[in-house]
Amino acid sequence: MSDSNNANNAIQDQAAALEAGRAALRALYGINHKITDDSYDKTLAVKCKNGTFVGKKSDNVITYKGIPFVGKQPVGNLRWKAPVDVVPDDGIYEAYYNAKSSYGNASLEVGSLFYLDEDCLYLNVWKPDTTDTEKKPVMVWIHGGAFEAGGTVDPMFDCTNLLNENPDVIIVTIAYRLGVFGFLHLSHLPDGKDYPDAQNLGLLDQLMALKWVNENIAFFGGDPDNVTIFGESAGAGSCTMLPLLEGSHKYFKRVIAESGTPNLTRSTEDGIACTDELMKHLGCTTVKELLAVDAEKLFEASSVITLRQFPERDGIHLPLEPWKAYANGAVKDIAFLQGCNKDEMNFFVVGFGVDNFVKWAAGRKEKLVSRLTENEKELVESFCKDVPEAAYEPNCSLLSQSWFNAPSIRLSELQTMAGGKSYTYYFTPESPDPVMKCGHALELASVFNHPEMSADTGRAFDETFSKTLRKMWIQFAKTGNPSLSADLAPDGKAHEWPLYDIENKQVMVFDEFDIHPDKDAVNRIVDWDRTYFLTKYYC
């Protein structure tokens, strides 16, 4: 067979696999209708402020999908407007199917696997089927995706397995506006004064969802006074930014942040530059003209600013210096469990392809270095020269440090110095893929109890290891301390997780066959002299 035939067959196989993936995801969608007769199962109905919602039972878990947490969806003239609160509603509605996902960025392929719409602000609830009347701790998941992709419909975030194993919590997964729909600076435009929140709408959507949880989760058996928000990547970044929003602390008391910090933000200047680039691409000069652009066209056009759509340090919703806010104790009453993976950026090497990543990372490094002092430039070059690996590795390691690893440790340092609590971890198991190693998001299959989802790992991690990790997450949400006694630990061993402190700097190392605290691990996470300072430049 010729090389061209082999290539064509490979392309056809990839296309078939992609379409199969799309079909599988689309099967998870449906339309929730209003119920107008008396034929529904009353035992699965929950009356909330904005309606009565009827769920479905699977195994020992009842799921409620596609519940709106806003009074009006952000469509038409509400595009780029703050979320509208719910109003009382006596209607009865199906909560059987996932709602559509937010438009994100066309160049991030995962987004194209979902049904996309501006009508997207919905949440899902998983509760155990139990007669227990004691109110349960609540965990609210915020998905990642670079603030430009992803959704609650992702099969990874189906919480049935997790709740069957841990029926002592209630889990909620929330959606939010992504990309140019959720993070687009508009106030500098001639008619932009009426859109003062557009640059941080995704965060405001999350806050509105948390308000809904606060007001309604008791009807599902949840404790509104014991809520933990948790997320990964952009979701983790969101979890560390939400405590900086005014009035947010009444909605949650704990944060679990997997590979994300306030570092994942941009300045107002960067926000304006992205908007201007998008406007030029579309041939628009005003918000009015942007409003007339079809959502699908906006989605496709946003590819010109891929991986640049971050929440904005606007001085309105987010402080101009989030790190300073942490240092000053703005979040000290919120307990943290947070950390990073050993080889974060290797995930992006695999996702982009080596050649594309090398080009992209070189551009990112150039932009970063242009902001540094001469001494800082020397330190960065010294760090990169000491990475004796493949051509992609120096910049890969540098970006892992500046985006994820060093900021994770800075968060623990500042939170601790301000009088707050941070339980800090370092996730180290590797994929068989020599490029992926222990890349970004590799822990998710373990967290959500989906060992079958091994596309990124190449294998499922040890079952007892994964179960112990989950139990620590749940224990933190229940009590504020992730430590496990021997009788609670799936491996039968006591695991004392020390708080991060400035002197000992202990972190919990999640080695696949040896979960243990380690005071030396922090020096493997961050290069104190040559990369820690990069956190002041944000992402």
Image (cartoon, grey):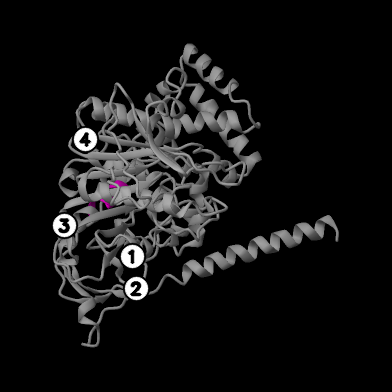
Residue interval drawn in magenta? 202-208
Residue at screen point 65% across, 31% down: 391
**Residue 205 included in the magenta stretch of the image:** yes
Q: Nearer the viewer, mark 1 or mark 3?
A: 1
Residue position for label 1: 164
| Quarter of the image with the N terminus in it | bottom right
Instruction: Pick whichever, 274 or 473, lies toward us.
Output: 473
Q: Which numbered disc, 4 or 2, marks the residue that appears first in the sequence?
A: 2
Q: Nearer the viewer, mark 3 or mark 2?
A: 2
Residue position for label 2: 59
Q: Which numbered disc, 1 or 4, marks the residue that appears first in the sequence?
A: 1
Q: Nearer the viewer, mark 4 or mark 2?
A: 2
**Residue 85 included in the magenta stretch of the image:** no
Residue at screen point 29% across, 46% down: 484
Q: Which numbered disc, 1 or 3, marks the residue that appears first in the sequence?
A: 1
Q: Which mark is residue 338?
A: none
Q: Are dots 1 and 4 in contact, CB under 8 Å? A: no
